[in-house]
Structures are given as C-alpha cells and as structure tokens.
Amino acid sequence: MIKQYIPYFIFLFLTLIFCTLILTAPLTANLAEKNQKNSIISLVSKLNYNLFQPLCHQKPERSFFAFGHKLAVCARCTGIYLGALILTIIYPLVKNINNNSTPSKYYLIASLIPMALDGGTQFLNFRESFNELRFATGFIAGSVFVFYLIPVFNRLFIRFAGELKLKI
C-alpha cells in the first residue's frame, strides 16, 4: 500500500529541497557577512547562488530579499518554484497520486499566458513590471506545471523500477 506513494514522496522531497536552497541562500550570505572568519559559510553561500545561476538571471532589482540579501532566484522564478511546491503538497487532494496521464496541453499554455504577457510587455518596453506581479504570474505557471510533472515523474519512476526489477 505505501509503495504506491514512493514516487510522489520522492518528487515532494526533491521539490522541498530545491525550494529550501532558494530560501537558504540569503540566510547563508547573511551568516557569512556576520561571521567573516568562517570561510565555510561563505563557500556554502557562494555555492548556493552558483547552483541557481544557470536557471535564473538573479538580477537584484527583480528579486525578493531576506536577511538583507536577495533570494537565489528572481521573483518570477520564486513564484514558479513555490507554486510547484505548494501544489505538490496539495496534489493528493486534487488528483490520484498514481496518476500517469497529463492534462490537455491547453491548460499549460493558458497558465503561461499571464507570464508571457507580463514578461513580453516589459521586454518590449511597454511598461515596467514589479516583483509581486512577477511572483504571481510565475506562481500560476509553476502550480499548473505540477499536473504535468508528477505524471511524467510517475511514469519514469515505474520504468526505472522495472528496469531494476524492483517490486513497486
């Protein structure tokens, strides 16, 4: 009975770790700043920010701050990842945890439209966006994306377990 939840809990754990790293980046930067003699904390802080550098531009003016330092990702990416985490937590209340089918692609496209409009109109210099709107549009996209990620993760996990001949 509990084995059917293994893929979900692995996905939840990985998402939780990912979001925790985003939020611990400013904490470690603050600790490194206060305790300048401890180079290990400084190294951890730099590694944390560098981990997310390929995923996000990390511009300070487009980021939220905690402990006097920016988060590891911008406001929009923060919304995407926190939206994914929150919806991953409530996913079992909405869908079957062993669901292997993804919804229509049109739901995903619809969830990306607010983010595209916000980012696109800013890119074209029609207006300047603000962090709360960036977060909200990212949150919408990230929360809907979970309904595609979990079924795909379930299928990959079942395939991987089958190749290893694990009884799941």
Image (cartoon, helix red, strand yellow):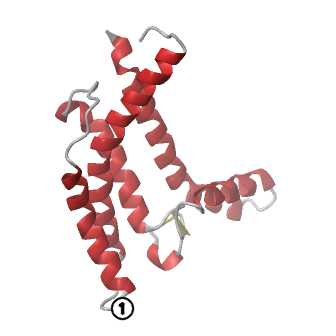
Question: Image check: 18 left or right of 103?
Answer: right
Give how far across and how far down residue 48 sits, in percent.
Answer: 63, 54
Label 1 secondary element: loop
Corner quadrant of residue 131: bottom left
Residue 38 in sight in this render: no
Give how far across and how far down residue 113 sits, in percent.
Answer: 24, 67
Q: Residues within 10 Å of mark 1 (few under 14, many from 20)?
A: few
Of 115 and 23, nearer the camera is: 115
Residue 2 in sight in this render: yes
Question: Image check: 4 left or right of 107?
Answer: right
The residue that disc 1 covers is 125
Q: Which residue: 46% across, 48% down?
A: 19
Of 58 and 7, nearer the camera is: 7
Corner quadrant of residue 3: top left
Give how far across and how far down residue 82 sits, in percent.
Answer: 37, 52
Give how far across and how far down residue 35 sits, in percent.
Answer: 73, 59
Question: Image check: 99 left or right of 84?
Answer: left
Task: Name the amino acid type tagged 1.
Answer: Asn
Q: Which residue: 35% across, 48% down?
A: 84
Q: Which residue: 36% across, 91% down?
A: 125
